[in-house]
Image (cartoon, helix red, strand yellow):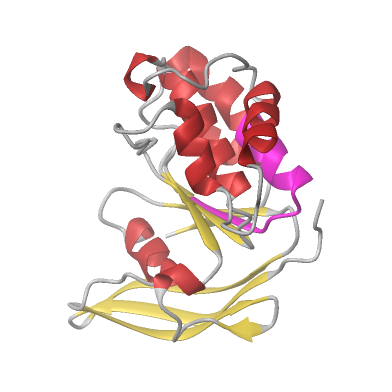
Amino acid sequence: MNATHRLELRDICIQLGDQVLVELDAEIGPGEVLTVMGPSGSGKSTLLAYLAGFLAPEFRARGRVLLDGQDIGSLPAEKRGMGLLFQDPLLFPHLSVAGNLRFGLPRSVGDKVPRVEDALAQINLSGFGDRDPATLSGGQKARVALMRLLLSAPCAVLLDEPFSKLDTHLRHEIRRLVFDRLRAAGLPSLLVTHDREDADDAGGRVIEL
């Protein structure tokens, strides 16, 4: 467990033309989940795009994004240390389940097989390594996507309504898995959602846009 990561959002302001979409000043400590709620079109996903480093050019943004005290605002997306979970699991269809997990591991990891097998066991998918991701259920895909993210060793995590496409009966189970794992890893996390139950299960502070 690495409980040292901290994400600071200092005087963030995002505009589209003259319209201010998002204003935010917050600090997210190790293992904390900050939830930003709002209806569609309120700027939630735009905020994540800005933090992750791929904000569309038609938006204007200012403010500082500090990760472990370092201003990452000028870094390219792949250098920011941010892990992302989206509405869709976005598993690579040309790779097996194990191949998707191997993709998440840093190149510095030598023998990836034991790490992948252990990761599958942690999400109750032992023996699924050779499976085609298309054969998995929605909940299984969500677990693989989460584990791939964790294996990539991010310093902070951005969650873009990752539970919205799951069957209702699965949502609480997958929410609990995701938030428990993020807390255990000591990762500061920002969740954007329009679902109050997501915020309730996240258990942290809530900011409404």
| 191 versus 198 height, above or below | below
Residue in the image at 41% along x and 27% along y: 96
Residue 65 figure quarter: bottom right
Q: Is residue 196 visible?
A: no
How far across and how far down the image is residue 132, in percent? 37, 20
Residue in the image at 39% along x and 51% along y: 38
How far across and how far down the image is residue 183, in percent? 74, 46
* In magenta stretch: residue 127: no
- The residue closer to the viewer here, 77 or 193, is 77
Q: Quadrant of the C terminus?
A: bottom left
- The residue closer to the viewer here, 206 or 173, is 173
How far across and how far down the image is residue 91, in percent? 37, 35
| 46 versus 90 height, above or below | below
Q: Is residue 7 visible?
A: yes
Residue 19 relative to residue 82: left or right? left
How far across and how far down the image is residue 101, in percent? 52, 37
| 14 versus 139 height, above or below | below
Task: Specify the segment rendered in magenta.
Answer: 177-191
Residue in the image at 76% along x and 53% along y: 186
Residue 187 figure quarter: bottom right
- The residue closer to the viewer here, 104 or 67, is 104
